[in-house]
Image (cartoon, rainbow, N blue to C red):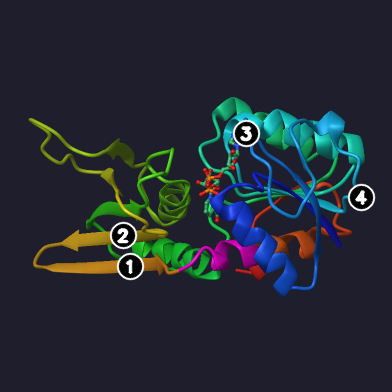
Amino acid sequence: MQLFIVGIGGKMGRALCESAAALRETVSGGLDKVSAVGHPTFTTAAQVNVPVDAVIDFSRPETLHEVIALCKKLHCPCVLGTTGYSEEDKKKIADLSAIVPVFQSENMSIGVNVMSLLAEKAASLLSGFDIEIIERHHNQKADAPSGTAKLLCRALEKGLDYQPEYHCGREGNAKRQKGEICMHAVRGGTIVGEHEIAFCGNNEVVTLSHAAESRTIFADGAVKAAQWLIGKQPGLYNMRDMLGL
Ligand SMILES: NC(=O)c1ccc[n+]([C@@H]2O[C@H](COP(=O)([O-])OP(=O)(O)OC[C@H]3O[C@@H](n4cnc5c(N)ncnc54)[C@H](O)[C@@H]3O)[C@@H](O)[C@H]2O)c1
């Protein structure tokens, strides 16, 4: 399969090139503001003149219009790993998925997706427990809270019997209110990604946590998603669909 990587010059772009080689797939080129060593790199979808079976995007939400243009031009499936999309972006992604198969997940690791299932179950069983999320990432991460924290919130909502109110951090006169979920974003050094959900009850705390030790887990997940997407009908797919969770 010929893979085309949007954001090929970035941290995930480099990890994707390594995963593609390990999984015996070819990277035919990529799109980025900076050129990637060893691969033809383009700055717009209109310029792309290499064979492409699937597009994988790990860049920034600002590149979404180029990803959409490319998938429409080549009529090929795409895997979206970028985080921080707006509601308007999500609408555009849904529109694209009516034309080609689209796979989207804020976290392409098996571990976090199993954790999301456990979080849903824990939320349904630990009635009345206060829930807090702590996420830690490297000092170059653009968006906060992380896409994975939002993915975990969606899973928690499925298990809760109330609609939580979300907060990001706490400052000043900010006593905890019943039914809120507060997300805390730590940024520093080279942390690949760590997520913790604390379910705090009277005299006991249950913690679910996941630590990514390498970007390989996300890159392998994305390449496998592209392989899984080939031949699928147009639609919006995610990790739970692929893993059968
Ligand atoms: N879904 C997942 O499993 C997962 C895992 C890790 C990271 N991510 C997300 O993937 C994205 C990329 O992460 P990263 O750590 O590789 O970031 P990065 O900053 O190292 O790389 C991003 C790349 O995109 C390029 N880029 C940005 N804006 C562009 C534009 N307008 N046109 C062309 N190229 C542009 C940059 O030049 C850079 O090379 C982020 O949104 C991050 O949150 C998702």
Q: Which residue is mark 3?
A: 90
User: In terms of sequence position, does the residue under pointer 2 or pointer 1 come before the other?
Assistant: 2
Type of amino acid at the residue the image marks with label 2: Ile
Residue at figure coordinates x 19%, y 60% from the top left:
200
User: In terms of sequence position, does the residue under pointer 2 or pointer 3 come before the other?
Assistant: 3
Vertical relation: 63 (above or below) 230: above
Question: Callout 4: helix, strand or loop?
Answer: loop
Distance CA(mark 1)–CA(mark 3): 28 Å
> Ligand 1 lies in which image quarter?
top right
- Residues tagged 4 and 3 counted as in contact (Cβ below 8 A): no
Q: Which residue is mark 2?
A: 197
Vertical relation: 96 (above or below) 219: above
User: In terms of sequence position, does the residue under pointer 1 or pointer 3 come before the other?
Assistant: 3
Distance CA(mark 1)–CA(mark 4): 43 Å
Q: Which residue is mark 1?
A: 208
User: In terms of sequence position, does the residue under pointer 2 or pointer 4 come before the other?
Assistant: 4
Q: Which residues are magenta?
A: 214-221
User: In terms of sequence position, does the residue under pointer 4 or pointer 3 come before the other?
Assistant: 4
Residue 118: percent from left, percent from top: 42, 68
Type of amino acid at the residue the image marks with label 4: Pro
Residue 58: percent from left, percent from top: 62, 47
Vertical relation: 220 (above or below) 88: below
Distance CA(mark 4)–CA(mark 3): 27 Å
Quarter containing the C terminus: bottom right
- Residues tagged 2 and 1 counted as in contact (Cβ below 8 A): yes
- Give the side of residue 152 with respect to residue 204, left or right: right
Type of amino acid at the residue the image marks with label 1: Leu
Q: Which residue is mark 4?
A: 51
Distance CA(mark 2)–CA(mark 4): 43 Å
Of badges 2 and 4, nearer the viewer stands 4
Question: Callout 2: helix, strand or loop?
Answer: strand
